[in-house]
């Protein structure tokens, strides 16, 4: 999960209509020393008009028409030459364009209908609400809820081979906070979504993001079991520490967003009857699951035995092969797909 939330404050370009004429002369935009800080975070400040005139200005006011049709009158008053004055724009959340007529006196020269335009964007960093039930891999869609009005959502989906599956941008029209926002992606048949990254924007451009694993094979060194046994030898426990650390890291990334489960598959060599090996491999997977549970894994742990049906090393029947007495560990929001070495879905809960 990427907790990267950003906000920015930027000076925006202002369009001033050259000069304003009066009976006494001309006033230029440079005389008024005007700029605007229009992109702001709501919880910290409002947009501001900034004046730093080169001459004394009096009776300054702006009559503006906002892009939503609202009339906005802004009283500015007198400003001494070289003095900076910041005038808040009375605006809540939203993205607007203002077209204004500025009037007043500069160096005792009256002017009016001095045209200016500026843009504003007021928003806040949206909080993202996303649970395991909101991610529907079968339908290729997820439902997101935001704490702010909705601007757009960008979604990147990656396969378990590390290659991109899809990149989509869903645009919205300022839907109210809490509105279910459905984002869909496409996925080739047989592809497995391994992780996704999401960026959610409000209309002002403020965003929050997260990255979550939905399916990942946990790399590990195989624990060696004695033939016909399922106990984890003390000499083999050290091999479980690295996968334990990786599992805990991945779980922290999705904490509060997704419900991810740990699936442990057990396997045997070809010595013995297939039905006995199914039971033996189940006990091996359960033993590893219990070890992880005792180490404080904060996730549901499920196990299943596949016996000799998925051999790591192909051997004839009744062959004692230590590399086939093993286990696999997978984190996922859903049970692992059958084409990843898990021929059945008869998972039982260890924790």
Image (spheres, grey):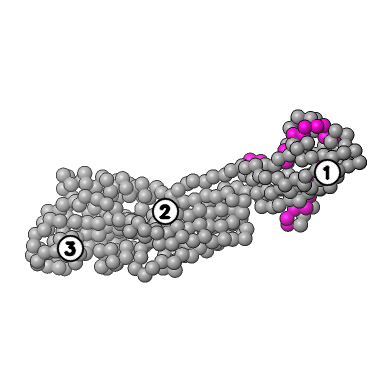
Inspect the magenta stretch and tell me whether residue 253 lies in it. no
Residue 310: name its quadrant.
Answer: bottom left
Q: Residue at x 33, y 63 (%)?
A: 335
Q: Position of residue 158 (x, y in %)?
A: 39, 58
Inspect the magenta stretch and tell me whether residue 66 lies in it. yes
Q: In this view, does 158 lie to the left or right of 56?
A: left
What range is drawn magenta here? 44-68
- Given residues 254 and 34, the one toward you in this image is 34
Q: What element carries label 3?
A: loop
- Given residues 39 and 218, the one toward you in this image is 39
**In the image, residue 283 above or below residue 55:** below
Q: Is mark 1 on a helix, strand or loop?
A: strand
Q: In this view, does 53 lie to the left or right of 230?
A: right
Outermost residue toward the right?
23
The label number, if any, that marks residue 212 in the structure image: 2
Report, in whole angstroms, how far the alpha carbon at label 1 lies from the one at label 3: 85 Å
Q: Is residue 299 left or right of residue 40?
A: left
Q: Earlier in the sequence, mark 2 or mark 3?
A: 2
Q: Mark 1 points at which residue?
A: 20
**In the image, residue 248 above or below residue 167:** above
**In the image, residue 350 above or below residue 189:** above
Q: Residue at x 71, y 40 (%)?
A: 35
Q: Are marks 1 and 2 in contact (CB under 8 Å)?
A: no
Q: Which residue is drawn at 22% across and 56% down?
A: 327
Q: Residues within 10 Å of mark 2 (few under 14, many from 20)?
A: many
Q: Do the residues labelled 1 and 3 touch (CB within 8 Å)?
A: no
Q: How crowded is mark 3: few (under 14 residues within 10 Å), some or many (20 or more)?
A: some
Q: Mark 3 points at which residue?
A: 311
Q: Position of residue 325 (x, y in %)?
A: 16, 57
Query: Which quarter of the image is occupied by the C terminus?
Result: bottom left
């Amino acid at each position: 999960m990427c907790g990267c939330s950003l906000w920015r404050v930027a000076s925006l370009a202002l369009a001033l209509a050259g000069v304003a004429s009066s009976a006494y002369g001309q006033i230029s935009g440079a005389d008024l020393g005007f700029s605007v800080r229009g992109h702001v975070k709501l919880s910290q400040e409002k947009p501001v008009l900034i004046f730093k005139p080169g001459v004394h200005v009096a009776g300054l006011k702006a009559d503006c028409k906002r892009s939503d049709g609202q009339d906005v009158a802004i009283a500015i008053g007198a400003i001494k030459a070289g003095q900076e004055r910041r005038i808040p724009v009375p605006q809540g959340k939203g993205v607007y364009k203002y077209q204004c007529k500025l009037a007043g006196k500069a160096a005792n020269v009256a002017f009016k209908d001095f045209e200016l335009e500026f843009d504003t964007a007021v928003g806040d960093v949206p909080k993202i609400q996303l649970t395991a039930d909101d991610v529907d891999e079968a339908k290729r869609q997820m439902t997101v809820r935001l704490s702010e009005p909705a601007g757009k959502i960008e979604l990147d989906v990656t396969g378990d081979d590390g290659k991109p599956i899809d990149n989509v941008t869903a645009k919205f029209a300022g839907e109210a906070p809490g509105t279910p926002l459905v984002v869909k992606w496409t996925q080739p048949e047989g592809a497995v979504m391994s992780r996704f990254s999401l960026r959610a924007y409000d209309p002002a451009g403020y965003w929050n993001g997260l990255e979550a694993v939905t399916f990942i094979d946990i790399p590990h060194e195989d624990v060696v079991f004695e033939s016909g046994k399922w106990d984890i030898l003390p000499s083999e426990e050290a091999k479980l520490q690295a996968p334990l650390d990786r599992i805990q890291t991945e779980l922290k990334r999705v904490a509060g967003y997704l419900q991810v489960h740990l699936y442990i598959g057990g396997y045997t060599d070809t010595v013995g009857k297939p039905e006995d090996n199914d039971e033996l491999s189940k006990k091996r997977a359960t033993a590893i699951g219990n070890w992880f549970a005792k180490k404080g894994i904060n996730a549901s742990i499920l196990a299943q035995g596949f016996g000799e049906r998925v051999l790591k090393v192909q051997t004839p029947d009744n062959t004692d092969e230590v590399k086939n007495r093993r286990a696999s560990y997978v984190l996922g929001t859903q049970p692992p797909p059958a084409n990843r070495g898990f021929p059945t879905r008869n998972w039982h809960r260890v924790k």
